[in-house]
Image: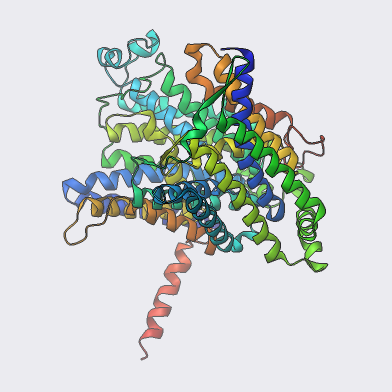
Amino acid sequence: MSTLQTLVDAVALGSLYALVAMGIALIFGVMRLVNFAHGELLTAGAYALFLTNDLPLAVSIVVLFATVAAFALAMETAVRPLRTASPAAMLVTTFAISFLLQSVFLLVWGSQGDNAGILPELNRAVDVGGLRIRWVTIASIGVGALLLAGTALLLNRTTIGLQMRAAAHDFQTARLLGVRANNVIRFAFLLAAVLAATATLMLVVQRPLVTPTFGFAVVIPALVGVVVGGLDRLTSATLGGFAIGFGTSVLGDVLPADGRVFLPSVVFALVILVLLLRPSGLFTRARAAAERV
Amino acid sequence: MRRLAGLSELAGPVLLLVLVAVLGSLASRSIQVEFRSALVSATIVIALYVFIGNSGVVSFGHVSFVAVGAFAAGLVTVPEALKLSASPELYPFIASAEVGNAASLAIAAAVGGVYAFLVGVPLMRLSGLAAGIATFAVLEITHNVLRNWPKIGPGAKTLPLVPETSSFLQVTLGAVAVAAIAFAYQRSRPGRLLRAAREDPAAAQGSGVNIHRQRLLAFTLSGALAGFGGGLLVHLLGSITTEQVYIDLAFITLAMLIVGGMSSLWGAVVGALLVSGLNSFLAEAERGLGSVDLPTGTRLVTLGFLMAATLLFRPAGLTGGRELQLRKALARFPEKWGKERPA
């Protein structure tokens, strides 16, 4: 396998994780909540695709976005008591919500997995100068870049975006100045839902088997990427998500065959290293490491 | 006298553990194992509490120490030939090691403690979210290595025929001893320093508390106790795979601690026993229990709901994170009694 091919695959996985990471970072930005349960938005979306498998594509996609948005709004309502909680309590609570939703999915659909195959034509590859590139790779990269740019525009050029940035910077003061906290937070969840639904679509094309841990398996690396990249800014968190996907993919190709089983260990060891050396994140300006003792 | 008054706070958890043991030994043979398993869970949750409760730092990684303890205790008690048939590549010093039951538990505690110390030296500098992610990374690494390195254990296979020596007497003594150690620690000088750092890190540091050192001490102690809990677990189950000491166990033990209340020993014990009881009941009900027959999966949904609801609506847990004031509770009792029966 050529170096270039390795890089293309790595960019594809990276942009997928970046989409998920951006959703997590958006919510963290407005309410300092690290949402472990973000993955269950993806799982819910994937089950929506499975249930509407026989319906026309457009209907499937509409149902997908509606389901994910409904889950996100329900989640927003559920976590309201957490707004004043400590970071550790928030982390454990969303962990619990994630566990609860996973067990509900398990209860309803079982652990065998259901086939939600959609848009199989995207899995075909085009040959570009000896490189095999699947359409879904191109779509992931394109859609990822588009959504990232769109979100950046929204945050920088619209009133609600300004309010979100103000809330992220200093929630109390923003409220005192008339920013409606509930609206801003709800909007952030909706935006995260759009990103999650898009990521679901890209994921289901590549891994059509939907299990209760479908989203959890993606959110763990994305979340790790967000923390490694730096939670405080949307860009650094998204880059972190990209980096973890890119790094995992490259390492998977580079490591010798008998060392490949230890890939998770290598990735997580690197994560610990980054957390120790740059606790505020890899892609942030080195600021006070307030969280260290 | 004040010492004795303090000790009464230990009486509550110990009495409850003993009560469960006595009830269990009177129960029918088929459900005795559920009671023993509840006591082993209590041991692991108390170990978890020693670090999380006193430091206020969340650790998702403690099941790693349970895992290494369980495999260590299992590997040193299974005969050499059996070990080699499960994993032919085992290092000779592991393959040839064969000790008695008590020694295997001591080894489990030592391995857990040493591993926690090594992990803790760098990790205890982190707090909050970073600590959560880093300890989660430890869990992933431990699982990945144990599963794929056949020289230190059975790898992805089962370690079979571990002597089932975790009798009622042994698990009760184990749980009570661990509770006593946890209690002694939280009332000791290092324990109080760490609790001060939990309440206000800046003030504690300003008063000369070396937070890193105190956290490391608690983490190591907690790792040793968790390793010991792993030893009890493997001798209870009689066999072990890496999947039994992974995310599911981490979820469940954390849920037990949270439901009970993570900042008191009483909370840890109450949470562990209550959730174990519920867990066993629901597992039985899923298999069909008289007229109750719940669909498979109800158990996990109930546990998840309980954990999420506790955290959202009663974040300090059922006990409110307070120790049981046994004397006050007893003193209040006749008073209430009197009011209910107007003379």
- The picture places residue B136, in percent across and down from the top left corner, at 55, 36
- The picture places residue A25, in percent across and down from the top left corner, at 67, 46
Quadrant containing the C terminus of chain B is bottom left
Quarter location, residue A20: top right
Q: Is residue B98 above or below residue B260?
A: above
How many numbered discs, if any? Answer: 0
- With B307 as the anchor, is B31 left or right in this view? left
Residue at 38 percent of width and 8 percent of height: B92
Residue at 46 percent of width and 28 percent of height: B143
Q: Is residue B104 above or below residue B82?
A: below
- With A198 as the anchor, is B37 left or right in this view? left
- Nearest the viewer among A134 and A161 is A134
Q: Is residue A8 above or below residue B33?
A: above
- Nearest the viewer among B316 and B246 is B246
Q: Is residue B230 visible?
A: yes
- With B265 as the anchor, is A290 left or right in this view? right
- The picture places residue B158, in percent across and down from the top left corner, at 31, 25
- The picture places residue A180, in percent across and down from the top left corner, at 74, 67
Rendering colour mode? rainbow
User: Most extreme residue toward the top, as rendered?
Assistant: B92
Q: Can residue B276 be seen in this view?
A: no
- Nearest the viewer among B208 and B24 is B24
- Nearest the viewer among B144 and B226 is B144
